[in-house]
Amino acid sequence: MYLEKIREPADLKKLNIKQLKKLAEELRAEIIKVVSDRGGHLASNLGIVELTIAMHYVFDAPEDKLVFDVGHQSYAHKLLTGRYNSFQRLRSMGGASGFPQASESEYDSITAGHASTAISAALGMARTRDVMRGDFNVVALVGDGALTGGMCYEALNDAGHSGTRMIVILNDNAMSISPNVGAMSRYLTHLRQSRSYLAFKRGVRRWLAKLPHVGMPLFRFLERFRDSLKSLFVDGKFFDALGFRYIGPIDGHDIQHLIRILRRAKESDEPQLIHVVTQKGRGYKPAEDHPDVYHGVAPFLVESGEGRDDSHIALGRIVAKQLAELAENDIRICTITAAMAGGTGMDLFAQQHPERCFDVGIAEEHAVTMAAGMASQGMKPYVAIYSTFLQRAFDQIAMDVCRNSLPVTFLIDRAGLVGADGATHQGVFDLSYLRAIPNMVVAAPRDVRDLKKLVALSANLDRPMAIRYPKNGEDLGPGIQAQQDFRIGEWELLSAGTDVMIFAVGRMVQAAMQASIELMGKQVSAGVVDARFVKPMDEKLLFEQASRARLVVTVEENVISGGFGEGVLDALARLRVDRPVLTLGVPDRFVGHATVDQQLQRCGLTALEIAKRVLERYRALTESGR
C-alpha cells in the first residue's frame, strides 16, 4: 500500500503517475471504510481525490496555503498530511475533525465549516503575503455549490479588481447538498457541455489522425494547450470580467493533466480560476447514483449502502409533513430553504406543493429577506435552516423581518449540541441572538407533541416566530404530560418544589425532570417548569415559582452569555424577586466533535451533572444560612 507510507505530502511527490493513480484508489477505499464506520461526508470526498493529490503534488503545503471551502471535502487532504491514524477515529472524541481544523494540523490553514468563505480567507492570506513580502502560493478550493452564496462574488470581485496573485479552483460536481439551483448552476452546465468546443476537438482529432506519422504527435502537442484552446470556444467571460483568468473545464480525474495545469497556474502572477469537473461519489456506486443521499451519512453497510440504524425520526420531516397538511387549506403557506431541502425535511413539502417550496442555494441572507418580501405581500413563509447556518442571516432577521414585524416563521433545525460535526456546526447561539431582537417570538419544544402544537400555533400568528429543535425525535425524549393548549409566552409547571425551582428549555426539560428526581433522593425538594417560550417569558409563573424557592436554576442547551438564563436574571430583577440564581448552559468556548452525550457531559448538562451542580450550590446556600 502507498497510503500507509504517506507521512507528509513530500512522500507522494516521489511517486510516478501510475503509482499516484493507485494511491487514488487506496484513498477512496479508506474513505469509504472509515465513513461507513464513523459516518461523515462521503460523496463530495470521493469526487475530489485526484484533485487533492494533484494539489499536494504541485504545491508545497504548509508553506503554500490550501484553503478548503466548507471543508466537507477535505478527507483525502487529511489522509495525505500525516493524519492516517487519527482519521480512523474520524468525528469522534480524540480523532480527526470532519472539517479543516487549524489546531489539528499545520496543513489546515484555517478552521472552516460554513460555505462560501474560502476565497475571502485566501485573499486575506495572499494580501498578507504581499504586505510582508512573502513568496508562497495561495489556493482556494471552492465547490460549485458554494457559488450560490453571495460572499464568493464579493471576494472574486475584490481579488480580480486588485489583481492579487492567487488561484481559485472551482470543483464542479453539479451538486452542493441538494442539487444546485440558479443561474450560476446553468452557466457552469453550459461550460461543461459546450458543444462548440467538443465538436471542434473531435473534428481536429479526426483530421489529424489522417495525417501519417505527424498527425497524432501533433494532436498530443495541441492537447497540452487545450485549456487555451477551450478559452476560444467555451465562454468563460463571466470570470474574466471579474478579473480572473479562466482555465477549463478540466477533467478532475486526470491526475497527469491536473498536475500540468496546476504547475502552469503556479507560475502566473495574475489571479486565476481553474474550472475542474469531477464526479461526486466516484468509486462507490450507491454514492454515484445518489450523491445527495450520500453527501452526509450516518454509519452504513458498504456492501448494500444501507444505514446501520434507520430508526431515527427526523424532526424536520415531522414538521414538513404537518406544514404540507396545513398548506392544503392555506395557500399562503410556503417553505424556503438554503440548499438543505433534504436535510430539513422540506423535500416532503415539495412533493405535495412544489410551487410553494423554494430552495435558494447556499444563500441564507437572501432566503430570509426573500421571506420578508413574500410575507409583506400576504404569504406565510416558513424558513427552514440549521441553527449554525441561520446565524449568517442575523442582520436580515433583525432588519428585514423583525423591524417590519412580518409573519415569517423560522424552523431552526439541528439546534443545540450536534455531535460529530463539532465546533463549526453547534447550534448553541440562536437563543442569545434571537431573544435580543424586538418583535420576535422564540420557542423550544420539550417533545414531539409540543413541536406540533408550536407549528400549529405559528400558522395563526401575525408576527415573527422561531421554533428551535434538535435533529431527531428521540433527542427530545418521550412526552412527559400533555397540556391541552397553550398561548404565546405561556410556560408549564411540571412538578412543584420548595427548595429548588428549575426552569428548563427544550431538550433540557427531560434532563431537568431526571435531575429533580435525583435531588429528591438527596432530600432536596426540586420542582421543574417547562419554559417553552424564551421570548416572551411567562413572568407571572416565573414570579410565583421563583418566590417560593430558595434557589432558582435555569438550564438551556445554548451559550449562557445572552441566553435564557440571563433573561431570567433580568426578569427577576425587574420583578424584584431576590433569589440566588444558578444558570446552567454551554460554557463560553467552542465545543469540539464528540457524541452528543459526551458534549452534554463536557458542558455539565446531563441529568446527573445538573443534579450535582444544583446540590453543591444548594448546600452552599444552606451552610451560609441563606
Image (cartoon, helix red, strand yellow):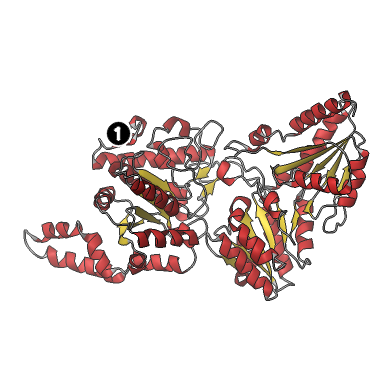
Which residue is rendered at x = 68% and y = 73% of the image?
A: 376
Which residue is rendered at x = 76% and y = 56% of the image?
A: 452
Which residue is rendered at x = 60% and y = 50% of the image?
A: 388
- The reply to whether residue 4 is visible in this rendering is yes
The amino acid marked with disc number 1 is Asp
Q: Badge 1, how many Cα within 10 Å: few under 14, some, many 20+?
A: some
Image coords of residue 28 (percent x, y): 40, 42
Q: Nearer the viewer, residue 2 or 95?
A: 95
Residue bearing the label numbered 1:
11
Q: Is residue 399 left or right of residue 236?
A: right
Q: Is residue 564 left or right of residue 232?
A: right
Image coords of residue 96 (percent x, y): 49, 35
Q: Is residue 519 above or below residue 542?
A: above
Q: Residue furthest top?
A: 623
Q: Secondary structure at mark 1?
A: helix
On the rendered image, what quadrant is the N terminus found in?
A: top left
Q: Is residue 411 above or below residue 310?
A: below
Q: Is residue 529 above or below residue 384?
A: above
Image coords of residue 36 (percent x, y): 51, 40
On the rendered image, what quadrant is the C terminus found in?
A: top right
